[in-house]
Image (cartoon, helix red, strand yellow):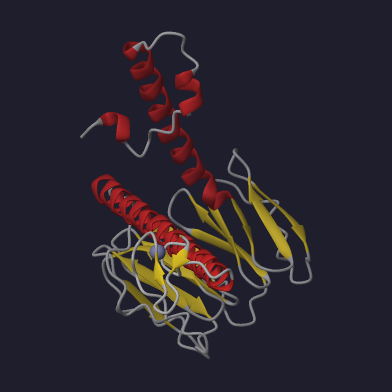
Amino acid sequence: MNRATSIWDFTPKARLEGYNEVNIERINVEIQRNQQLGKEVRGRIAKFQRCIATYDLHMVGLKSDGTVIAVGCNNDGQCNTGDWWSIIAVATGGSYTVGLKSDGTVVAIGDNKYGQRGVALWRDIVAVVVGHSHTVGLKSEGTVVAVGDNYSGQCNTGNWRDVVAVVGGAFYTVGLKSNGTVVVVGVGEDIYGQCDTNDWRDIGPIDEEKFLATKQRREQEKKRAEEKLQAEKRREAEQRREAEQAAEQRRKVDQWIQQGLCRYCGNRVGGLFTKKCKSCGKPQS
Ligand SMILES: [Zn+2]
């Protein structure tokens, strides 16, 4: 693969054009530097992604030292995270807060009306997400545990296998399987079809080859569509011009007829009885 067309290549074109001389070596170094930078930035974003969470009325932040701060509504004590430590990810539900600890256990504080804080015995958790009042833990072996409000069946993840990522909807739970398909439980009133993922395939991280192939295909499609549009515009302009020319020609002929000139060429007409054009010889009716 040509490295210069990698998805990590976001070297600004303007900067490359800024070089007085085209120095391939320097440009390559620049591209590599930006590719490296892109990877680092993306890695950092991925790590930061689980460090801030909100659902509704309160927000929590995971600090770089593994402690957790919280602001907002504390009616159920959901902001009392002051004594947490060794946290590596946070998530917030409707009125409670959960934290994933580096040892694979989970802590929770706040509303426990539905038993959504019942995570004390969880072990070997690699990701924790929540809905409104249910808590979901992804285990390293690819199974998923869930506690809390199960009115819509959102905790029925017991038979899930090969799961590599989880998301909590308000009243449902979503799992991404290692084969790129998606499983959902819960749903409740699925009036928008927000859980109709049955035909989803190939969900997963970016595959550079597929990414570039699609980029190329879509760009070509766009270019072809633009070319087609331009051609249509040209054809329309041509038709308009032809119509204008025809109208102009009709006006001219009308004028010739009014002036008693040949209707075909506009020259003088002669002959007393059978009027014929002196120039083109055509009889005038
Ligand atoms: Zn004539």
Left or right: residue 89 compared with residue 125: right
Residue 22 appearing in the image: yes
Residue 105 percent location from the top left of the image: 46, 58
Image quarter of residue 235 = bottom left
Residue 269 percent location from the top left of the image: 45, 66
Quarter occupied by the C terminus: bottom left
Tell me the residue at 20%/35% (across/down): 1
Left or right: residue 75 compared with residue 137: right
Image quarter of residue 26 = top left
Question: Looking at the image, which residue sits at the far left?
Answer: 1
Left or right: residue 25 compared with residue 265: left
Residue 216's place in the image compared with 232, above or below, is above
Residue 124 appearing in the image: no
Query: 280 or 231, which lies in front?
Result: 280
Query: 217 or 133, which lies in front?
Result: 217
**Dividing the image into four equal quarters, which quarter contains ligand 1?**
bottom left
Question: Looking at the image, which residue sits at the far top?
Answer: 21
Tell me the residue at 64%/82% (across/down): 113
Query: How many marks can you see?
Result: 0
Residue 152 percent location from the top left of the image: 49, 89
Residue 182 percent location from the top left of the image: 33, 72
